[in-house]
Image (spheres, rainbow, N blue to C red):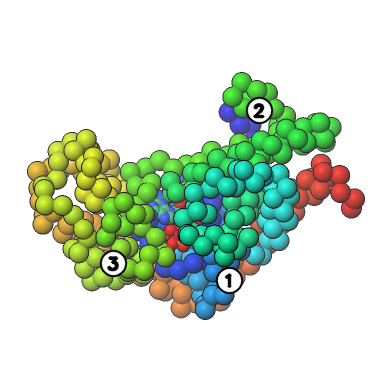
Amino acid sequence: MSEFKPLVFSGVQPTGNLHLGNYLGAIRKFVALQDNNDCMYCVVDLHALTAQLVHEDMRGQIRSITAAFLAAGIDPKRHIVFNQSQVPQHAELAWIFNCVARIGWMNRMTQFKDKAGKDREQASLGLYAYPSLMAADILVYRATHVPVGEDQKQHLELTRDIAMKFNMDFMEKIRPTGLGVDITVGDEPVHAYFPMVEPLIDGPAPRVMSLKDGSKKMSKSDPSDLSRINLMDDSEAISRKIRKAKTDPDALPSEVDGLKCRPEADNLVGIFAALADKTKAEVLTEFGGQQFSVFKPALVELAVEVLAPINAEMRRLMDDPGHIDAVLRDGGERARARAEKTMTEIRDIIGFVR
Ligand code: AQP
């Protein structure tokens, strides 16, 4: 529907060890998309301050996410890899979006509720405003497509709401600038400055669950390291964690319907499918009727085969922080030029004097 120039944007927070959920839900899609698209991949370090202000090794975390991007196969020469704090225009646009977004919209964000927990009064204002900064990350480049895990779906809907409200509120100011694009949203024609971003969530593992509890998402902040496979885990750790993963006593079903009400089995089959680039149905054609004692070793073998080269390359890159910093500096410079172009236009649309 969009006549905007296609652009892929996504970000990852430097808040701990990357895990299989981050890889399958996000980074692997980043790699696949770069063949046919202009892509920007960002280490969102400003977001990392929202839940915890002081980080023991912020620089190391930023480098490690960047190393994961590169080790997974992202090409920083053809595309742009950078860290958010190098481009102050993200924060500038986020302020404008704080004035576009409505408090009622923000109050519905489930991630804030989850992360703030019971003591909401003690959560930072930044955590509350997180989705507004995320909208700015994307829209400061007028990006059209955003590959993310399912947990980010609600934030992307909010990004569309913010874009739509800005477009509608400023439509008569956008029109004379010649910077807008005629699009249709629903049945409504809109002369838009910002595109309606499309989330790219599909795949067999849009939400990888904890290995210890099939009802909780795999997460960097889970206190149990056994709940997740980290990209920096060696083969022995991967094998131990999969062998200890929670399951039920039944054999695997032959049909996908048989995974309903079996969250742990569903999760492991989904992980296998994503790692093997197959559908869950194809995995069950191979393993239906088999016990976990057969399936788990096959999953270990596959996980090690896919993750070991990434792990080795990450370690190699982490030994050369100068190279990683140079990649980020170069990406930051190119991202800043694009973001400043947008901000100059937005300042004009709003009517700031320059
Ligand atoms: N379990 C998951 N399954 C699929 N995708 C996931 N993502 C995160 N967890 C899963 C996707 O990874 C990308 C980067 O996430 P992030 O680090 O920016 O933020 P997050 O969603 O808050 O990730 P974590 O790992 O759960 O961290 P903590 O514990 O700090 O909250 C996003 O595209 C996300 O959807």
Residue 30 appears in the figure: no
Work out whether 255 lies above or below 223: above
- Give the residue drawn at x 38%, y 46%: 206
Mark 1: few, some, or many residues within 10 Å (few <14, many ≥20)? few
Residue type at numbered disc 3: Leu
CB of mark 3 near ligand 1 (< 8 Å): no
Look at the numbered disc 2 and give the secondary structure of its residue. Answer: strand
Dot 3 corresponds to which residue? 226
What residue would you read off at disc 1? 53
Which amino acid, mark 2? Ile
Of callouts 3 and 1, which one flags the residue occurring earlier in the amino acid sequence? Answer: 1
Q: Nearer the viewer, mark 3 or mark 1?
A: 1
The residue mark sitting in front, 2 or 3, is 3
Q: Quadrant of residue 128?
A: bottom right
In the picture, measured across the screen, residue 206 lies left or right of residue 142, that is: left
Q: Secondary structure at mark 3?
A: helix
Q: Earlier in the sequence, mark 2 or mark 1?
A: 1
Numbered tag placed on residue 123 in the rendering: none
Q: Is residue 214 visible?
A: yes
The residues bearing labels 2 and 1 have C-alpha atoms spaced at a distance of: 40 Å
Quarter of the view holding residue 261: top left
The location of residue 48, given as percent across then percent down, is 55, 65
The one nearer the camera, 169 or 240, is 169
* Mark 2 Cα-neighbour bin, 10 Å: few <14, some 14–19, many ≥20: some
